Image (spheres, helix red, strand yellow):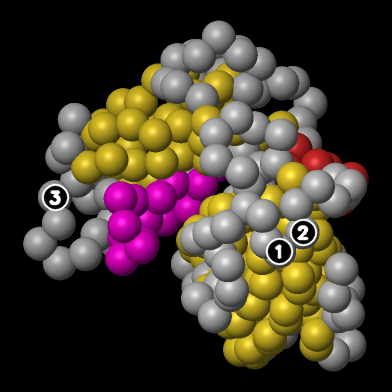
Amino acid sequence: MTAWQGDARAGIRIIAGGTSPENGPPALRAGVEIRLAPGWKTYWRYPGDSGVPPHFDFTKSENVKSVQLAWPAPERFTDVDGSFIGYRDNVLFPLSIEPKDAAKPAILRLTLDYAICEKVCIPVQARSELTIKAGATAGSEIAEAQKTVPRAQPLGADAALSLKAIHRDNAAKPARVLLDIAAPAGRPLAVFAEGPSADWALPVPDKVDGAPAGQQRFAFALDGLPPGADASGATLKVTAVAGSDAIETTFRLD
């Protein structure tokens, strides 16, 4: 792993994680860890009502064909500006790296632009570099971080945590989307909605009444769409987080 790059408020490092066991092209495993001091937070890929998502740039790497980054399940936070989505303490983003030549090490060079927030938000840029070789012993940190990434799940799946149904309420102004979700009893449930592209700024869903027995209902307004965009037929993604379990469901809004 690299040394920490940052200060007392926040820092980043890269951790090597061995060779990916999945079938397909040879892939190397690694992770980018962000460390946050108590009280400080950073943002998810969609920050919510305010904030700036982190931007991971690996373009200066050597012997790297592609890098796939996975996003651990985030939390919902509330302040005077509304609700935002992100992380506190430490968060580790798993990476799957496809080298151009599997027989040679990959030199992973990262420039990370992100924001940290306590009472005010501060933009931060950090750089880090690590040479990653195939066949190295897999790191337990990467495996544990992978477990925190929401798993893809279809609408209506028979699972303890699942998105059961979607309703469009056109009587509301603006129209809103209702989400009926089954979740394990006794666990707080957080729900996030994303549009088909980064310029969609959908509100963070709130819990409302009217859910079927054994389920919880969340709602969000069809607001924050880019100019000229039509919600009908758009592909939306819902992430639901209940304790250590998290899912992602993608659907077409008819």
| Residue at horizontal 62 percent and vertical 22 percent from the top | 161
Q: CA distance from mark 2 to mark 1?
A: 5 Å
Res. 105 mark:
1
Q: Is the residue under label 1 in contact with that under label 2 (CB below 8 Å)?
A: yes
What's under tag 3, amino acid-wise?
Asp
Q: Amino acid at mark 2?
A: Lys
Q: Secondary structure at mark 3?
A: loop
Residue ranking furthest to the front? 103
Q: Position of residue 67 (x, y in %)?
A: 55, 59
Q: CA distance from mark 1 to mark 3?
A: 46 Å
The mark lying in front, picked from 1 and 3, is 1
Residue at image x 84%, y 90%? 7
Q: Which residues are magenta?
A: 188-204
Question: Residue 173: x percent and y percent?
Answer: 22, 48
Classify 83 as above or below 53: above
Residue located beneath label 2 in the image: 133
Q: Identify residue for label 3.
A: 230
User: Residue 195 in magenta?
Assistant: yes
Image mark for residue 228: none
* Percent coordinates x, y for residue 34 in the rendering: 77, 70
